[in-house]
Image: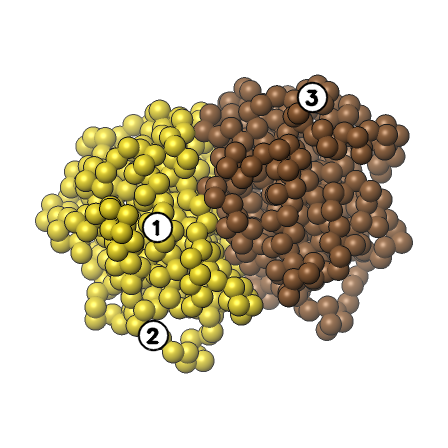
Chain colours: A yellow, B brown
Amino acid sequence: MKKLGKQTVKFDNPPQIISSASVVGNKESQGPLGKYFDQVIGDAYNKQQTWEKAQMKMTEDVVNNALDKVNLAKEDIDFLLAGDLLNQIVASNFAARKFPVPFLGLFGACSTMIEAMAVGSILIDGGVAKRVVSFTSSHYQATERQYRTPNEYGDKYPPYKQWTVTGAGATILSNETGGVAITMATLGKVVDLGVKDPKDMGSAMAPAAADTILNHLEDSDHSPSDYDLIITGDLGQVGKNLTIELLAEQGCDVSKNFDDCGVMIYNSKQKSGAGGSGCGCSAVVAASYLLPQIMYGNFNRVLLLGTGALLNPMTFLQGETIPCIAHAVVLERTGHLTEGIGRPAIQDSLATKIETTKIEDLS
Amino acid sequence: MKKLGKQTVKFDNPPQIISSASVVGNKESQGPLGKYFDQVIGDAYNKQQTWEKAQMKMTEDVVNNALDKVNLAKEDIDFLLAGDLLNQIVASNFAARKFPVPFLGLFGACSTMIEAMAVGSILIDGGVAKRVVSFTSSHYQATERQYRTPNEYGDKYPPYKQWTVTGAGATILSNETGGVAITMATLGKVVDLGVKDPKDMGSAMAPAAADTILNHLEDSDHSPSDYDLIITGDLGQVGKNLTIELLAEQGCDVSKNFDDCGVMIYNSKQKSGAGGSGCGCSAVVAASYLLPQIMYGNFNRVLLLGTGALLNPMTFLQGETIPCIAHAVVLERTGHLTEGIGRPAIQDSLATKIETTKIEDLS
């Protein structure tokens, strides 16, 4: 691997995503992408005593699900890489204790899944891992009561606020062949343009997303048209539009091939403000919709960004603005599904559905 | 680089620590290692409005201090790697926004500094970075009110409880020569033997420390006597003794060359319970005492472990046990200080002090 420009790593032997899985809540299962997700939890408690434990269980389940799909045991994994929104990333820590595997805890807020895939790719192309699992999760009720106020307090819900996705996603990266390749990773800088409203995450995160996209294109000597899709993690409708505008101001036209996982995950009837957010948002959309699309051949090259707001409730109360970050990976189709590797279990269930879902249906 | 055994990475061209710096609070400056620290903040507010902002400022200052020592500019750095104990690692995030450099947020609780040095070493030996800064921080008042109860509530302070270090530490890792080499890194698994008392972190973390030490020795085919010193981050007196016992049960005798940064940082008159703890504990002891000792030649090979308790206050209230982790790096002397590189600024101030500090004085 080598560094391109200031922020991008290009992989010599691109790590392959050989499996991915998602577990979501009821609301997410009723959205436009509902049929693609692997597992739906019953109610928000997921048969546990608390919302936090519900999230821990989802997180553990999604890793096991991703392993099961390609018949791998826990011991076949070299590293776990994960983080989440709960204080001290406890959903990831508590899931990781079920696996006898070295664990690297990460925190990039809602960019964590992409950070985990980028660091995992570096471990694999660097020759120190054969397989890693990158995973993350978020949970609506657990997140709301930690970051804002408990829902029972009846706080206002302005239209630009986003809805935290209840969902856990996992990908297995490998030095084997047959999956979706991660050919580059662009690591983001912390960007803070002074947004202070913690309900308006889209506006806060858009400059970080635009910065990473511009730096990625410069580092890789690519233009937006080199990608079938440029897709952000959880900017929502407000942040999506703002990012397109910010890029246009820099002479970068992404209006034809840009979308956002937060915009895609709920429909307009689901009363979700500006769209989905949370670590789980990009993770479940990537794991169960985007990666199969690429594998099936509907997209050949995708720039996937995770976007994170790096605040906590106290920094807001202390009058601080919201620093943000965006990390990106380039996902490329390397071939068709191969027997026994890739995502054989998903091939059947997705084949017909994906054929009819083209890029123009996404926005 | 290559993987040894299950958990260890051995570097082909060992990254070199070419600079390190520390900023501490008043209490730390009055302890046995006080004279080694680079900067002491005035009071706990560090001329800021809140304790959290005080910590952010310390964190920013320590990175600048480490850069200044070797005449590097912000732009000379390829990546920042950091995390801390504040919810959503905001001390690190807010410090990172002052640097136009890609940032990888990490969370390993008090093992974060070692995790950051390990991942940074992988980036450098993997050829995608020339220089990285690994940093972390903790702050007594900010940590206490977040993790436990505000000090003003007068909670009990049992003798086995530890005292969170107010301190920030940074190291600059480089592909240049002339510093202290990181020759191996051993990444830890999450270990949870069922300890539930969040005031007894030493007992909770000791099994993780013992696990990583045993795995490191097995992976590297080393014995304890191959190290001049095996030193943990913040086990305190309780955890230190327990780790020695746990290792002895496995036939591993570290009784002659084992110490703990948390035991070293305060003296017995400072009323600090079982010793220091917090992300900053191992960071400042390593940055300002351990690395100069190695560079000066008093130690040739040291196994440095960071030890982290991966709980949050809610997991404790929900009846959960405390999962823990320990990451390790091997630090080796590669030569004397070189003009213009290494730590020239520190050489003068430390030369005479360090000559008289031998390993037997440590415990």
Q: Are marks 2 and 1 on the same chain?
A: yes
Q: Residue at x 64, y 29 (%)?
A: B18
Q: Locate residue A203 relative to residue B39 in the image: left or right.
A: left
**Which residue does the numbered mark 1 point to in the structure image?**
A209
Q: Amino acid at mark 2?
A: Pro
Which quadrant of the figure contains the N terminus of chain A?
top left
Q: Amino acid at mark 3?
A: Thr
Nearer the observer, B232 or B17: B17
Determine contact: label 2, label 1, CB under 8 Å: no
User: Badge 3: few (under 14), some or many (20 or more) residues near its Cα, within 10 Å?
Assistant: few
**Which residue does the numbered mark 3 point to in the structure image?**
B338
Instruction: List x then y, in percent, for residue B74.
Output: 54, 39
**Mark 2 falls on what kind of element?**
loop
Q: Nearer the viewer, mark 2 or mark 3?
A: 3
The answer to which image quadrant residue A238 occupies is bottom left
* B211 vs A277: above or below: above
The answer to which image quadrant residue A70 occupies is top left
Instruction: List x then y, in percent, for residue A84.
Output: 46, 54
Chain of the residue on which disc 1 is drawn = A
Q: Amino acid at mark 1?
A: Ala
Which quadrant of the figure contains the C terminus of chain A?
bottom left
Q: Earlier in the sequence, mark 2 or mark 1?
A: 2
Chain of the residue on which disc 3 is drawn = B
Q: Locate residue B274 relative to residue B10 in the image: left or right.
A: right
Residue A66 visible: no
Q: Residue at x 50, y 37 (%)?
A: B75
Checking the image for residue A158, the label placed there is 2
Instruction: List x then y, in percent, for residue B241.
Output: 79, 43
Q: Residue at x 35, y 24 (%)?
A: A12
The answer to which image quadrant residue B293 occupies is top right
